Amino acid sequence: MEIQKLEGVTVISTDERLDAMIAPKLKETVKKMSEDASTKLIIDLGKTKFIDSSGCGALVAALRTLLKNHGDLKIARPSPQAKTLFQLTRLHRVFEIHENLEDAIKSFVK
Amino acid sequence: MGQELYIKIELKAEMFLLRPLDAFVRSLINQLPAFSGNENSVDNMELVFNEAYSNISRHAYKSAEKGPVKIEIFVKDDMLEIRLEDHGEKFNPSEVMEPDFQNLGESGLGIWLMKQFVDDLLYESGECGSNVLRLVKRIPAENVFFPCGCLE
């Protein structure tokens, strides 16, 4: 999991798998970030080939934590497997999802 | 006469084994002609296994000391079955409610997701009161598993 700041937006790039092994770490990381009010966060799934229900749960938790502190979360570059899961679980209606990272950043900056 | 494949793995249901086991199951399913080249179906079956194993490790065996799990994979001409047997806390999958999609929680999706990708999800009592989860995926006749005797 890599974290960087681009144009005032925090980007977390998740590894190959966003599963029950890593979901608690993602939740904890976002919780700490949310202590700064109005955190703008993008979870970049570009490298992530596999997400399970714990991964989805971590994304939901991250969004809730940020919204409570006037921040926001957007998703970038989901894999076909992630898209299938988001559609099944209707999470594609919950998250703002972008096909590339640049668009996701622009959507915060504009 | 149909051909068959049977694999059995017995181990402690440790979480750190989730990824190696996922990788093995994925690789195996990817070798089956009915799934080979169909990334979406392979993804789905990997997810089914992942959720089942993860549930046992985290929920059936809640304490740090994990109990045993027996993983069996059966492949027949027209069917793939993944069976997981544990001796942990029982649950009733039929009582698992459909998720509230208007207000999705941070957990509780696993069983529902498994049901989306298999034809049968059966939860039975095994020997000595064990819990047996059977996940059955049927294959349409045109996609039978061993059309060319690939495992001969």
Image: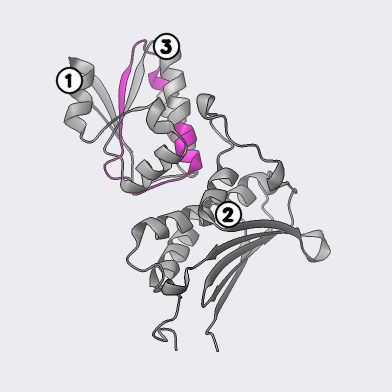
Mark 3 or mark 1, which has the lower sequence index? 1
Please give the residue where the numbered disc 1 appears in the rendered image.
A7
The label number, if any, that marks residue B37 in the structure image? none
Instruction: Find numbered disc 3 in the image and state the secondary structure of the residue it sits on.
Output: loop
Name the spot of residue A56 as percent of width and height, x first. Answer: 45, 36
Q: Which chain is disc 1 placed on?
A: A
Chain label for disc 3 = A
The residue segment tinted magenta is A32-58
User: Would residue B58 be found to the left or right of residue B130 on screen?
Assistant: left
- Can I make out residue A66 in this image? yes
The residue located at (33%, 45%) in the rendering is: A48
Q: In this view of the protein, which residue sits in the foreground, B57 or A93? A: A93
- The CA distance from mark 3 to mark 2 is 35 Å
Question: Residue B131: horizontal and vertical position, in percent?
Answer: 73, 57
Which percent across, then down, holds residue A52? Answer: 46, 45
Subunit ID for the residue under disc 2 = B
Check chain identity for marks 2 and 1: say if they share one: no
